């Protein structure tokens, strides 16, 4: 049975409740059916750690008590999904900013301002209104979910967490004699090391010592 800190592999398709448009899916056939398929996307089950906020709150909470192989449909209010729209996140950006960056803004355009993603809402002489709310803020959603597998092998879990924290090409991990050894290409910040260690200890099935090697 799935519980907090379980490592699971899931397939899901998310729909906007109002019009049943697909906004995200791990299933190629569903993407094609919803006319959102892209050959640049790897459609395959997602791996998550339950309770770590890797998916929206309501979906994360729904995994508790489920079993491997179980499928279900989940309806979420916007409060449990992508949040409520916040008018304070609508910002007026001078047109000069876009001209300096060789950008011709138009309504609906996705932009990054100070490394923060936003959506252009209106364009008028001298100014552009950019919305920094999540694009699905204020939307109720529906998920079709399947718990494909509960991952219980500690090495498989540790490899997933290593890739999530450090990138697939930046670290290697081994488990031997109750010691988890993480070999990185360069020294990592202490805060990141501590966060990784905490998550690893909460998720693995046994008690291990954790050793970092550069």
Image (tube, helix red, strand yellow):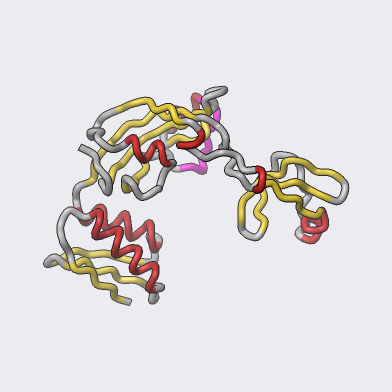
In the depicted structure, whether residue 212 falls above or below residue 168: below
The residue located at (70%, 39%) in the rendering is 108
Which quadrant is home to the C terminus?
bottom left
Q: Is residue 162 visible?
A: yes
Foreground pick, 205 / 34: 205
Residue 148 is inside the magenta segment: no
Residue 167 image offset from top left, x and y in percent? 40, 61
Q: Which residues are magenta?
A: 34-41
Foreground pick, 31 / 161: 161
In the depicted structure, whether residue 165 falls above or below residue 31: below
Residue 48 image offset from top left, x and y in percent? 34, 46
Quadrant for residue 35, please give it: top right
Horizontal side, residue 61 vs residue 155: left or right: right
The residue located at (66%, 43%) in the rendering is 87
Residue 116 image offset from top left, x and y in percent? 61, 55
The residue located at (28%, 68%) in the rendering is 182
Which quadrant is home to the N terminus?
top left
Residue 153 image offset from top left, x and y in percent? 19, 50
Foreground pick, 170 / 188: 188
Foreground pick, 68 / 175: 68
Horizontal side, residue 212 vs residue 175: left or right: right
Residue 36 is inside the magenta segment: yes
Name the magenta segment's main secondary structure: loop
Quadrant for residue 50, please give it: top left
Give the residue at the far left of this rendering.
177
In the depicted structure, whether residue 179 falls above or below residue 3: below
Q: How many numbered discs sit on the rendered protein?
A: 0
Horizontal side, residue 210 vs residue 145: left or right: left
Q: Is residue 31 visible?
A: no
Horizontal side, residue 136 vs residue 111: left or right: left
The residue located at (39%, 67%) in the rendering is 192
């Amino acid at each position: 049975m799935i519980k907090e800190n379980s490592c699971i592999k899931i397939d899901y398709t998310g729909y906007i409740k109002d019009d049943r448009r697909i906004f995200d899916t791990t299933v190629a056939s569903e993407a094609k059916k919803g006319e959102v398929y892209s050959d640049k996307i790897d459609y395959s089950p997602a791996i998550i750690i339950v309770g770590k906020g890797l998916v929206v709150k309501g979906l994360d909470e729904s995994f508790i008590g489920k079993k491997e192989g179980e499928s279900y449909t989940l309806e979420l209010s916007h409060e449990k999904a992508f949040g409520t729209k916040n008018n304070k996140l609508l910002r007026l950006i001078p047109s000069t900013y876009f001209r300096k960056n060789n950008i011709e803004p138009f309504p609906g355009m996705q932009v990054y301002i100070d490394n923060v993603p936003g959506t252009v809402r209106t364009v008028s002489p001298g100014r552009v209104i950019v919305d920094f709310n999540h694009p699905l803020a204020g939307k109720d959603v529906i998920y079709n979910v399947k718990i494909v597998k509960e991952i219980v092998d500690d090495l498989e879990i540790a490899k997933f967490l290593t890739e999530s924290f450090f990138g697939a090409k930046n670290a290697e991990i081994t488990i031997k004699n109750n010691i988890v050894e993480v070999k990185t290409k360069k020294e990592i910040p202490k805060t990141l090391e501590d966060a990784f260690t905490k998550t690893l200890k909460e998720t693995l099935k046994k008690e291990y010592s954790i050793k970092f090697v550069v």
